[in-house]
Amino acid sequence: MASRIKITSLLRRRRGDDAMALPTSMTGADDKRSIELGRRRKLSSPSLIKYILGFGVLSLMIFHRRNKGIISPRLRVAMRTYKHQDWRDWERHNFRNEFQCSRHLRETTKSVPTLDYWQTLRDVYNSVVDSSFVFDDLPPTQGYTLNENGAPPYYAKLSPGKGRSLFASRDIKEGELIDGIEGGTKSDMIFTTVEALQRYLLALPEPMACDVLEWSYTQKLVKGGPAVLLVAGDISSLMNQADDVANVEPKDKTSSTLLYANRDIGKNEEILMSYGVFPPGLW
């Protein structure tokens, strides 16, 4: 009988110990819940939001590489500025390296830009630089008709060893206006700040960005006015640098956007200028 009481007493003690251990077990569960709540708080932190955004941008970049041409200009800017947050400090060579322009710029068999090509350049300009700018109706694949007695003064085609070039579409007399309108044409894309041009480059597909890097220059639209960055949104961008002596030049070499023939130019002769006539570059 005594041994039975002892065993019962031991069992009760053990049960009591288990009962006493229950709060400890519950405390452990509470600790786990606290840890889980802490994790959830961390999941809602700004660092996680940044991580999610980064993952989203990375996914879009992968999608872009597989589906070139589908990404909108604004989205392309967002992707590239997220990837390169120091883009405002970039110089031209940084953009050339990013877009791998060396081979593209050396290629002399690049086709003459099509109407769709020029239209894309203009659409992106309206999208990320100046939505209010209205381009003129003149097809960017031809020059302005500046002489009422003749056709546009030049046309574009490939030149052996040079690539894309401009040639006289008719005989041109010395002193005749070849390109430009006082105050700029409605085909010129104007960038009043370096950042505006940088953002435009980031919005373009790589080959187009490389072309714009090559075609952009500094100019004053009116005499005495501020210098701006310009890109001609038509075939006048294809006018090459003269190896020796140019056959077109501005009358005012510090500010004018007007180019005149400095001698008679025969039909089908290449039209050449000196890039050195432009003011010092803003960028």
Image (spheres, helix red, strand yellow):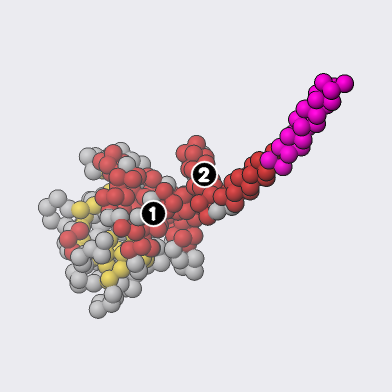
Q: In the picture, residue 176 is in which quadrant? A: bottom left
- Quadrant location of the N terminus in the rendered image: top right
- The three-letter code of the residue at mark 1 reads Gln
- The three-letter code of the residue at mark 2 reads Phe
In the picture of the structure, the residue carrying the numbered disc 2 is 55
Question: Is there any visible trace of residue 16 in the rendered image?
Answer: yes
Report the residue at 72% width, 42% height from top: 23
- Quadrant location of the C terminus in the rendered image: bottom left
Decide: few, some or many residues near mark 2? Use Cα within 10 Å; few <14, some 14-19, many ≥20: few
Q: Mark 2 or mark 1, which is nearer the start of the sequence? A: 2
x, y percentage for residue 227?
27, 71
Question: Is there any visible trace of residue 140 in the rendered image?
Answer: no
Q: Secondary structure at mark 2?
A: helix
Q: In the picture, residue 277 is in which quadrant? A: bottom left
Does 149 appear above or below 20?
A: below
The circle drawn on residue 85 is 1
